[in-house]
Image (cartoon, grey):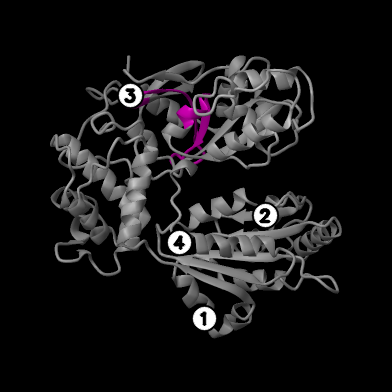
Amino acid sequence: MYEQYYGLSERPFSLTPDPRFVFLSQRHRDALAHLLYGVGRGGSGGFVQLTGEVGTGKTTLCRLALEQVPENTRVALILNPMLNPAELLRAICTELEVDVDDTGGSLQLLIDRLNAFLLERHAAGERVVVMIDEAQNMQRDSLEQVRLLTNLETATDKLLQIILLGQPELRQVLAQPDLRQLAQRITARYHLDPLDRIETEQYVRHRLQVAGAPRCPFAADGLAELFRVSEGVPRLINIIADRAMLGGYAREQDRIGAALVRDAAREVAGEEYDEGSGWLPGMVAAAAATLVIAGGAALAWLIIEAGGGESEAGVRPAWQGALSESSAESAWTEIAALWPGISADQVSSACAGNDSAELACQRYRGSWGYIERLGVPAVLPLTEPRGAYLVISGLARDEVLIRHQGQNLRMPVRQVDRRWLGEFLVIWPDDGSLLRPGDRGESVTRLKDLATRDPDQPWAGSLDDQFDPEFREWVEQFQQLNGLTVDGLIGPSTRLFMKLPHQDGPGLIIDRNGD
């Protein structure tokens, strides 16, 4: 909406995570080091604890740590910890691909099955790590069960490493006398504080630069006010800065000063805003939680209805009917119909994690700009209605194109944003192979040819059929530029970012004029 006015290629302060926008302050680097310590010490047992206020970047650090997991390490990431002991063990086993279908929910059978798996992995020289997000919400008996898992061991080694991530309340929970045995096993602790004033300014400038801003539109007093009202919490910085830029666009102001930032903070905080100190004491977390839900709402001074998708005279928009009928099964059918020669059953199997020699199904997190950069249809799991999935076949100015019963329907972006948390799936034909340095063949030549078309770093070397050291160096730079695992190998994700599937498959329809 305001991107063109400020010379941006995309919104710089989107709430959905995008690896290109990650900014690591010194305290974030320290916190990441603790997580990597926990992952790297996967055979030593014990706990690593990372806490921080809502919106300070714990989940982002968790994602970064997962991208740097060593090859000999398996990680079970638990995002919903509000489970009883049996449910938690089942979730851990599912993440580690341990077959527990025949355990009947028996806690002892689940422990036995997990222990057998851990012994097998230990014998193979692998580490196993369990990472639990929002751990402050765990039940007491589930925390105790997690502690007991660290008792699984050989004569010389612990078999499991546990990493707990949570809000500051986690420290209070673990300080309770009945959990002292668990607290004594914590080998590394780190509390992630918000950004300071200088880091806040660096954070804002970094995100604007990634979004293509020719200059920072925030005046010095605007940046100072942004730090004051956000208290350095990255999520709040994003929300308030986004609203302030929207307000600047609405008022045709090239420079965003303190007054506009205060207006933005007042708008998003509502009754919780205090003119003297910005946020009322203790309201940062509550405000952030509320604003995540309302992340796509516009400022009160600029309420613009998206055209072509809202109901008129009581007529129900087509997208509402499609939304109510959507499911994982319907999404698999729609996405299969877009790719020649694949079936809905193949898509369902690939996205369930089953090995397939024909399809890749990769899960990503990112903004609309990230989806546009990938350039192929995507499947979005929604929070409402429960179990709903949308197939995105194109992007328009203020709308997305959703696929329903073989047709493209328009749906306002803001209607999707209020139901979507930034996670999406991309499915495409791929044999799962890895091209390595030293390989030869037509496939290498084809990828080199594609590499010459890369807009950011075109390949200028030989177009022969050899995967030579120079091409490996290009691949590693390409992977780093695109936020991929830097290993110099060409697998499914690297092929996707190199646009190989686009040659014979459906492209993402881009209609920025909204025609």
Extent of the magenta region: 371-399
* Residue type marked 2: Val
Q: Secondary structure at mark 4?
A: helix
Magenta includes 46? no
To which residue does mark 2 refer? 75
Q: Residues within 10 Å of mark 1 (few under 14, many from 20)?
A: some
Residue type, numbered disc 3: Arg
* Quadrant of the rendered image containing residue 40: bottom right
Q: CA distance from mark 1 to mark 3?
A: 51 Å
Relative to 134, 3 lies left or right: left
Nearest to the observer: residue 260 or residue 160: 260
> Which is more N-terminal, label 4 or label 2?
4
Residue 409 relative to residue 424: left or right: left
Above or below, 345 against 224 in this view is: above
Q: Which residue shows up at 71% across the image and 52% down it? A: 96
Give the residue type that dot 1 points to. Ala
Q: Secondary structure at mark 1?
A: loop
Spatial CA distance of label 2 from label 1 is 27 Å
The residue beneath circle 4 is 26
Distance (Cα) linking label 3 and label 4 = 38 Å
Q: CA distance from mark 2 to mark 4?
A: 26 Å
Give the image location of residue 11, x and y in percent: 34, 37
Disc on the earlier residue, 3 or 4: 4
Q: Residue at x 77, y 50 (%)?
A: 99
**Residue 447 in the image: x percent, y percent?**
66, 22
Residue 175, which numbered label?
1
Marks 3/2 in contact by CB < 8 Å: the verdict is: no
User: Tag on residue 397?
Assistant: 3
Examine the rendered structure and indicate whether residue 140 appears above or below residue 403.
below
